[in-house]
Image (cartoon, rainbow, N blue to C red):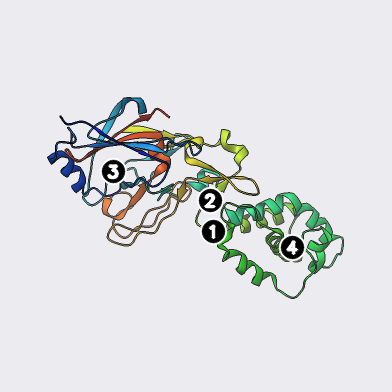
Amino acid sequence: MSQDMVLHGDGSRLMVAHAHIPDQFSMMQQGHINHKLFSLWLSGDLTSELGGEIVFGGLDWRHFRGGHTYVPVTRSGYWEIVVGDILVESISTGVCKFGCAAILDSGTPLMAGPTINSAIGAEGIVSMECRNVVSKYGYALWNTLISGVRPEIVCVDVGLCLYNGSQKVSGRLKTLLEDETMEGSAMGESAVCTFCEMIVFWIQVQLKQQKTKDAVFQYVDQLCDDLPNPIGKSFVNCGSLEILPDVTFTIGNKSFPLTPQQYILKVETSYSTVCVSGFVPLDVPPPRGPIWSICKFGCGSYSGGIQGQALNGWATVLGDRFLSAYHTVFDFGNMRVGFAKSAN
């Protein structure tokens, strides 16, 4: 007698991206499963010993609430579906109004494609640390500069640097931007010193142009925002999760919202807890790419056609952050995918 087969995961990679399913068909032929489908539940709790569960041939009703919304698989090779408009706090971004391709991949820990980070206030680690230095020490740097202290020792005077005039700021900034160890950790004294000297230089340039204090710091904040993000990921203040907006995906004409607690990942480091945005950019080569991005409710990268209308030009990846929020059925008998609210 055939029965459902259940595979429990320990939190490691459960890859369900590829839509060719010879193993599942083999199970059908051998009488191990009743139905041509498998279902996936991810716990979403990084501290749990049980990372998730995949059921071949059936569904585990304990892991979802309500019925599933089913949409067709639109392209073979991956579990690719069509995603409609994406909303931030109920406001349409407009990018996927006419439909965008989305790949379901439990092996992707975040959600690649739409960089909604500007809308939710997330920043690259370099920009965030730059703004932190401005916030904590900006006025002290201003006051020290206008008091007549030589610019090259201002940061020494406020206690952010040890005196070392042998290396130019531009060289240290280049080293900082190339440092791949910054991810998920607080920057050290040398990084703070580099930002301090950079900010002093920016203030000095604006003072020579006789700009007002408010204008100077607006300029400095903008320059912090424009710094490159070498590791791709963006971060938010962990204390601001309660005021961040929901992000809602439209699938099958139904809304699938993610709360900040679902799309923000808390990471414990040796220094502190950091909060990583679940939205990251991702470059995918043709014919499946490039992956599109949202730039503050609008712009995108596209290989041809009209923005948001040609499905072949746009794609995104819905990874663990989305799949943890919604129990997913991969129905390879009918080539469709179903979503229901997870019972996490």
For mark 4, give the secondary structure: helix
For mark 1, give the secondary structure: loop
N-terminal of the two: label 4 or label 3? Answer: 3
The amino acid beneath tag 3 is Val
- Mark identifier at residue 304: none
Expressed as whole percent of the image width and height from the top left, the position of residue 203 reads 73, 61
Q: Which residue is mark 4?
A: 200
The amino acid beneath tag 1 is Asn
- Mark identifier at residue 82: 3
The amino acid beneath tag 2 is Ser
Q: Please give left or right for residue 199 compared with residue 236 in the image.
A: right
Look at the numbered discs 1 and 2 and tell me whether their residues touch, using CB distance below 8 Å: yes
Look at the numbered discs 1 and 4 and tell me whether their residues touch, using CB distance below 8 Å: no
Q: Which residue is mark 1?
A: 229
N-terminal of the two: label 3 or label 2? Answer: 3
Q: Which residue is mark 2?
A: 234
Q: Is residue 224 above or below residue 327?
A: below
Mark 4, mark 2: which one is toward the viewer? 2
In the foreground, 201 or 160: 160
For mark 2, give the secondary structure: strand
